[in-house]
Image (tube, rainbow, N blue to C red):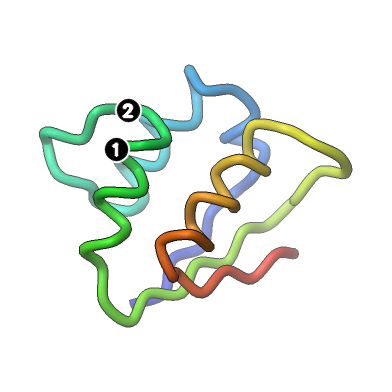
Amino acid sequence: MRYVLDAMKMKTKTEAHPYLKEMLELPEYYGGNLDALYDCLSEFEDVEIEIQNMPEGKTYVSKIVSVMKDADVKVELQ
């Protein structure tokens, strides 16, 4: 499955996790933090995620990308 996400909607923890839950169709019990994201993504199979509008420098979305990569999700940054 392939998902396309907008980095501009993941600039802060507060806005990122509800957006990720909706867009990635995460389960109802999703905890809304990076550890929970890793746990859910680790259960995915054959997933590709494209992140558009990736900002320069270290941001919260950078942490999300790191978690995605740690969970062996193929991530493409635009």
Spatial CA span between label 2 and label 1: 6 Å
Quick check: 61 left or right of 43? right
Do callouts 2 and 1 mark residues in contact (Cβ within 8 Å)?
A: yes
Q: Residue 33, image x and y in percent?
A: 38, 29
Is 63 left, or right, of 4 in this rendering?
right
Residue denoted by label 1: 36
Q: Nearer the viewer, residue 53 or 63?
A: 63
Q: Where is 76 relative to 38, above or below?
A: below
Between 3 and 75, the one nearer to me in the picture: 75
User: Marks 2 and 1: which is nearer the front?
Assistant: 1
Q: Is residue 57 above or below residue 17?
A: below
- Three-letter amino acid code at the position of disc 2: Gly
Q: Residue at x 33, y 82 (%)?
A: 46
Q: Residue 61's spot in the image, x, y percent?
A: 63, 40
Residue type at mark 1: give it. Answer: Ala
Residue found 59% across the figure and 52% down from its top: 65
Q: Residue at x 57, y 66 (%)?
A: 50
Q: Position of residue 54 (x, y in %)?
A: 75, 50
Mark 2 sits on what residue?
32
**Which residue appears farthest toward the right when viewing the image?**
56
> Is the C terminus in the top left, top right, bottom left or bottom right quadrant?
bottom right
SS for dot 1? helix
